[in-house]
Image: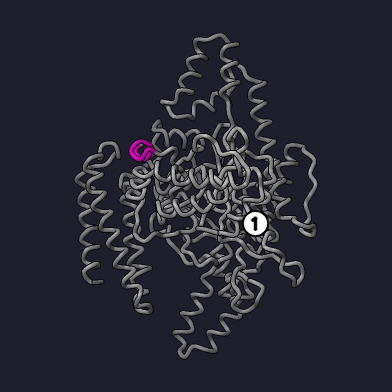
Amino acid sequence: MGIGYTIDSPLKLAHFGISSVVSLVDDMLMEKMREFHSQKANFPFQGISSKIEDFRARRITAFLDLMDGMVKEKIAEMKSSFSRKSEEVDKYFEMLPTASKARQTYFYLKQNASFSDLKEWVMENLHPGHIDVNIMTKLDKPNFSGNEQLPVEFNDAHAALRGFARSKLSSSIVLSAGMNPRLFSYMEKWNDFFPDEAGNIKKKVTIKVSDFRSAMVQGKMLAKKGIWVSEFRIESGLNCGGHAFASQGNLIGPVLEEFREKRNELVNDQYQTFCEALSAKGMTCPEQPPLLRVSAQGGVGTNAEHNFLLNHYQLDTVGWGTPFLMVPEAVSIDADTIDKLGKAREEDLYLSDISPLGVPFNNLRGNTKDQEKEANIKANNPGSRCTKQYCSLNTEFSKRPVCTASRQYQRKKILLAEAELASQQETDQAIARITEKSCICVGLGTSALLANGLSFESEGSGVSICPGPNMAYFDKQVSLKEMTGHIYGRDNLISRTDRPSVFLKELELYINYFFEKLKPQEADDNRMKTSNVKFLKAITESISYYRHLYTKHSEQLGVVLSDVLKRLSDFEKQVKGSLVAEM
């Protein structure tokens, strides 16, 4: 969802029992939002200057504690002012799944029980959603005091972890974008990540993974430190928003199947190592393995798909992200960006090379940050002023890292290309690749400023956004109640009849990825041919898996079987033809 879109979503959603995830990338944005919400609620506010020691971690702690306090206050207010006509309490239970026992009980008691019995039940069953946080582990930029590099614990991701660890929250930290062993080790310094004497863990760990092996490796790595992974979140490599971490052709259906078959193995393997590590630290291991949840996200768009993933793969939860960009009640988004998203179709949502991290990035064609970038290029002034520096990781020209989207870097890189390349065509192509990078660490936060009427003078007005391909099928702004109704099958927000099933869409994305991104690399790298054969074989196996799955469960998935089987056959011919050519 980007940096700013869910920055204050807990204040919009948590009192309705809905959990959301706050990115911990941008402490400058958090400080602005803390001031905004403090003033709005008439709370005292004292700014945290960037000139004081450990300001980044302090800002994060202060922002998270503010949200925690405000959510608890809202829940307390809902309880204390409860009456038979309490609209927000009604909305809380109305938005639950239709078959939810809590939803059914509430409305039954409202019609049939005494007010005192109803109120007593509400007091016991009205719980806030979690304020979870996210750290993208690759964004662990070193920081400096003058020209002196600070110790590793002052790196960006380390400081963000410290800010969360010191907060009052009892929630989860979601670690994404791969392993960061130094960050994993740093978690050992904070008691809240370990179980207490009753076996409860205040600060839980969730790890995003794309396959079972990654879950085993990362779970074991943390278990050796006495830290339990409470949730593995399986994310589609290409059918999600944000940065796209494509797998080696391992699609989400077969991956979820492996998790279902080997879930007990995952728990038991992690638990044994976990207990040994706690014993070595003089801590008590819980008698039973702590709860380990498995969830999935990526391109889910209908109630049928949602329920199938939950029931068939025995998942604990299914995540929805991109569709909520059309719900201003849930996210901080400006009207112009919502309008652009509503008009977007498949061709407007593409996998770009704009990210300074060098990872493919889901992008909306014509977003205002890219328009700003193009204007700079036309004015012969490529690159951006690097005001936040969260993506400053490149040391090609200096020991102190810079961002590849910055003006400083791009000027030097362009001069180097002009000096070294022989032809004008090669030079032009190189410059196009250099200037493609966009300042997303600023752009992904700007919408929150615009939506809340805050100053964007230092950031500029350009907005970056990173919706997943599923955005093409949600074409209008809707209310929170309408979106939850769509998820749980009470409403239908998709007017198009040509939306492909979630598994077929991901399969199509991977095949396109092969031809557009992987196949062209063979000309410059002979090793790519071997890798591509492995990729295509994995895709072929996935097609066979899906043919069996859809044949058996087409009704539950809400698809016309003959249409699905035809598409699978077409995909199979395309892949097998390429596989023969590769071999």
202 lies left or right of 363 = right
Q: Secondary structure at mark 1?
A: helix
Q: Residues within 10 Å of mark 1 (few under 14, many from 20)?
A: many
Colour setup of the view:
one colour
Which percent across, then down, holds residue 189? 66, 50
Image coordinates for residue 43, horizontal then vertical, percent? 77, 38
Q: Residue furthest bottom?
A: 422
Residue found at x 58% / y 25% = 126
Task: Give the residue pinned by disc 1.
Answer: 158
Q: Could you tell me the amino acid type at mark 1? A: His
Residue 469 in sight from this viewpoint: no
Q: Residue at x 25, y 44 (%)?
A: 549
Q: Is residue 373 above or below residue 195?
A: below
- In the rendered image, residue 309 lying in the magenta stretch gets the answer yes
Residue ID at (67%, 26%) = 77
Q: Is residue 478 above or below residue 385?
A: above
Helix, strand or loop for the magenta stretch, by majority: helix
Residue 17 in the image: above or below residue 563: above
Residue 401 screen position, x and y as percent: 64, 71
Q: Is residue 117 magenta?
A: no
Whether residue 432 is visible: yes
Residue 294 as seen in the image, left or right of residue 415: left
Q: Nearer the viewer, residue 506 or 438?
A: 506
Total number of numbered discs in the rendering: 1
Looking at the picture, how far across and down is residue 81, in whole percent? Answer: 66, 21
Magenta range: 308-314
Q: Quadrant of the C terminus?
A: bottom left
Q: Quadrant of residue 72?
A: top right
